[in-house]
Amino acid sequence: MFRFPLRLAALAAFLLTTPCRAQILPPLGAAEQAAAMTQPLATGPGGCRAQFFYPAAWWTSQSITTPIELRQLHFRAEGFAWGNYGCLHDVSVFLSTRTAAPTPGFATNHGTNVINAWSGDLWVTPAWGTSPNNWVLSVPVRPFQYDPSLGDALVVDIVVPHGCPTGLGIAVDAVNAGTSCTGGPDAVAGAIVGTVPVLNIDYDVVPATRARADRFGFGCSNRPTGLHEYFDANNAFDLSGSSIVFSPLAPGWTAAPGTAWKNHTSPTTHVLADDALSGAVALPFSFPLPPLLCTTGMCPNLPDHARFFRVESNGSIWFTNQVDVDPSPTPREFVRNGPRIAPLWTDLDPSAGGSVLTEVILGNPVITWLNVPQKGNPLAVNSVQLELFPTGAYEVRYLAVLTTGPILV
């Protein structure tokens, strides 16, 4: 629907996950690190911060290619025994994903889906020196969804502000693969090294129909975030014949049953080609826009309110000149483009049939894609309607939606 940081996917009934599973990273065969890796355990009283990057290929090469939900992290001791054990105090663990190669800057290494997965004390247990050695540190994290098929690395960021108890000289088992960024607990930047700890991860497989929410960024104000749902072969479109009105209620939205389909009496007909955009259509009021995705701490210089919109042939309207008429919907692209509402983002072709109409009805702009076919499939016609309200609320109405391609709304 509205493009912005929160994604709601598969709003069907909540299903329980499959039983918890475990996976060790990296895959078998990675070269053992010669020297002991002290982070995040044997760090001395000054503490440390360590970011570990686990590439998506390490998951997919072990047949994990669909979304999973991380539940617990386990670190293994280096290959020697120690009887010391103790408590790490006030530890923070952050999880996110990253597309680009790691940099020395700790903050910039996180994706916009970063969460604070753990805050508190962690207990380090003794190790007996066997090979492989014991798992001596376990972190029960908040559920974090990770999809290795997207190609992003998993980022595990551990901040130990007070270091280890005196005499707790513990090192973790690490390999000469992957990447880490290590430094002091309050440092802005660290040092890049080509090693990572061996990590055992407890996870659940996320069913295709399970409801979930993923954070994609940081809002630039206290206005409502956005939402959307993605439909594909694993999540069939189920909104035909329905009507939903979304009303802003910061920091989110309320959703309620909408009203009946509105018939046009004196509409403007927009003759649109395939993958095309109309000219600017003036709004009868200033329409409040949601906050933009903010990933750098500097919010984009775009207005708080819209005074016009443009109609796209592929089932969206745009509120600025920052547009993209890509016919292939993806959640990631949706949240990173300019402000829009997508009542039916899919590959439509108005040049092959149907009508795209706009009209102000009882003071509110109404935009309709009427019997517009799927590109290359003239029998798969689609009818969807969007109405805007001065409060920032909007209503979507669906008649028949017959497209067979992926849809984002």
Image (spheres, helix red, strand yellow):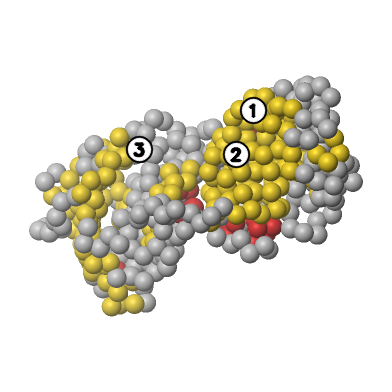
Tell me, for residue 121, which label it has, or none.
Answer: 1
Choose top left, top right, bottom left or bottom right for residue 253: top left
| Alpha carbons under labels 3 and 2: distance apart | 28 Å
Point out residue 65 in the picture as x, y percentages from the top left corner: 59, 62
Residue in the picture at 23% in, 46% down = 256
Residue in the picture at 64% in, 38% down = 139
Residue carrying label 2: 140
Please report whichever mark, 1 or 3, sits nearer to the chain's N-terminal start. 1
Circle 1: element type: strand
- In depth, the one of 347 and 324 nearer the eye is 347
1 or 3: mark nearer the eye: 1
Label 1 is placed on what type of residue?
Asp
| Alpha carbons under labels 1 and 3: distance apart | 32 Å
Label 3 is placed on what type of residue?
Gly
Point out residue 123 in the picture as x, y percentages from the top left corner: 69, 31
Kindly indicate whether the residue at mark 2 contacts the one at mark 3 (C-beta within 8 angstroms): no
Label 2 is placed on what type of residue?
Pro
Residue carrying label 3: 252
- How crowded pointer 1 is (Cα within 10 Å; few <14, some 14-19, many 20+) is rated as some
Residue in the picture at 43% in, 65% down = 234
In the picture, measured across the screen, residue 108 lies left or right of residue 18, that is: right
